[in-house]
Amino acid sequence: MSIHPIPEARHFDPILREDLGALYTARAARLRALAEGHELSAFLGLAAEITFAQQAAIRADYAGTEPVDAARIAASGCWLPGLETMIAQLIGRVPEGVRPHLDRLAALPEADKITAALALAESRFDAVDPALAPFIWAALSVEVAQAARAAPLPQKGDEETTYCPICGSHPVASHIHTSERQGMRYLHCALCDCEWHMVRAKCSCCGDAGQLDYLSFDTPEAAIRAEACNDCGGYLKVISAERDPDVETVADDLASLVLDDAAVSEGFGRTGFNPFALPG
Ligand SMILES: [Zn+2]
Ligand SMILES: [Zn+2]
């Protein structure tokens, strides 16, 4: 090991595509841990079950190599068998109150399921029943995430973009990495579960660097803070594995929705969303 590492030796990846099975395992475990004693315990537990079911919907024989087009994937219906797998697994594991929604989703004609998925892929969230949307999103996400891992990387992948450079969806939050990417900030995609790099201390929505506030409940060193921009009025959370090595972006974002309430009451608007707390 060198005491003075050569900068060029540190490989920089503008896009990270974590193994999907490992990602779902870590997320479900983190959601279950966060659910204990949490005031949103049932909600976090349900998100853990959905994540666990997503793992079962990963296709062993996935073989797509085209650039990712979420709307085309939604319209093709290729995610429907995955949804069926997920519903079969979830039906005995969700709270009583959720079962009727799953039954209703299972009974929905395929054409209606596809219409709903297409609306979600095109950010028309109001067009979809909010009780069914998270399940449809989760099944679509498994398929888009597999496509994102099989697709060629975009050529201009080192440009810093507000939206996901692979699938075009919104970020959940920023993730500050540790170990070999110590201190680097990536945005985590709500749909394909990839991450893309962005330098720190600038607004992930408008790019302004001068007028940021960091909101948190604990100390200024809190692992989860809202990066709020006084230029565009947007905010997104920054979730730091440097400060807490156990964090998982989607799980910790979901378990800190109370920080969203605080940011919104300060007049800021969230610029991305969590897959388990869709807009609309
Ligand atoms: Zn994406
Ligand atoms: Zn901004």
Image (tube, rainbow, N blue to C red):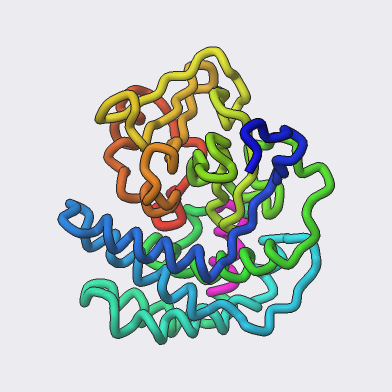
Which residue is painted at 41% across and 26% down in the image? 268
| In the image, residue 198 lies in the stretch drawn in magenta | no
- Left or right, 89 with respect to 136, comes to left
- The quarter of the rendered structure image containing the N terminus is top right
Report the magenta residues as a range.
Answer: 113-124
Instruction: Place residue 182 in its image quadrant.
Output: top right
Estimate the x, y position of residue 85 in percent, counting from the top left: 48, 84
Which residue is painted at 42% across and 81% down in the image? 87
Which of 243/130 is in front? Answer: 243
Which of 48/169 is in front? Answer: 48
The majority secondary structure of the magenta stretch comes to helix
- Left or right, 218 with respect to 171, comes to left
- Left or right, 29 with respect to 20, comes to left
Is 183 situated above or below 230? Answer: below
| In the image, residue 123 lies in the stretch drawn in magenta | yes
Which residue is painted at 38% across and 65% down in the image? 28
All told, the count of numbered labels is 0
Which residue is painted at 47% across and 53% down in the image? 126
Is 99 situated above or below 151? Answer: below
Which of 162/177 is in front? Answer: 177
Is 263 situated above or below 107? Answer: above
